[in-house]
């Protein structure tokens, strides 16, 4: 099984549950899919995932942290601590 998230893509707004905070009937946007590949004896499955505005902001911050360079700037420049 895998989770494919997309931030800032085409959004479909509606009312429903948020998959992150699990709050009930609130305004949500599409943010990705939960997928399982097919195979012998298994059917491929794709379940859309929706998040509320607050959780979309959390995902955006997680993405920014993941894309940030893991090396501190002064280490990359060769400067002493």
Image (spheres, rainbow, N blue to C red):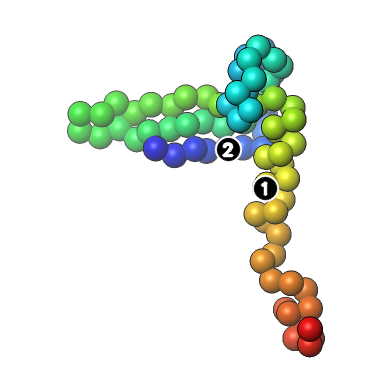
Mark 2 burial class by Cα count in 10 Å: few <14, some 14-19, many 20+? some
Of callouts 1 and 2, the N-terminal one: 2
Left or right, residue 44 beside residue 49:
left
Q: Residue at x 38, y 26 (%)?
A: 45
Q: Residue at x 72, y 79 (%)?
A: 76
Q: Residue at x 74, y 72 (%)?
A: 72
Dividing the image into 4 quarters, which one contains the C terminus?
bottom right
Can the viewer see residue 8?
no
Question: What distance separates the C-alpha of mark 1 from that of mark 2?
Answer: 10 Å
Residue at label 1? Answer: 63
Q: Is residue 81 above or below residue 42?
A: below
Can the viewer see residue 16?
yes
Residue at label 2? Answer: 5
The quarter of the picture where residue 59 lies is: top right
Q: Percent x, y for residue 10? A: 67, 29
The secondary element bearing badge 2 is classed as: strand
The quarter of the picture where residue 24 lies is: top right
Q: Percent x, y for residue 6? A: 61, 37
Q: Is residue 78 above or below residue 10?
A: below
Q: Percent x, y for residue 53? A: 74, 27
């Amino acid at each position: 099984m895998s989770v494919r998230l997309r931030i800032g893509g085409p959004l479909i707004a509606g009312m429903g549950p948020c998959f992150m905070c699990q709050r009930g009937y609130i305004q949500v946007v599409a943010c990705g899919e939960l997928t399982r590949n097919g195979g012998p004896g298994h059917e491929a499955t794709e379940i859309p995932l929706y998040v509320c505005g607050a959780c979309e902001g959390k995902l955006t911050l997680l993405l920014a942290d993941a894309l940030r360079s893991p090396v501190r700037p002064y280490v990359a420049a060769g400067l002493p601590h």
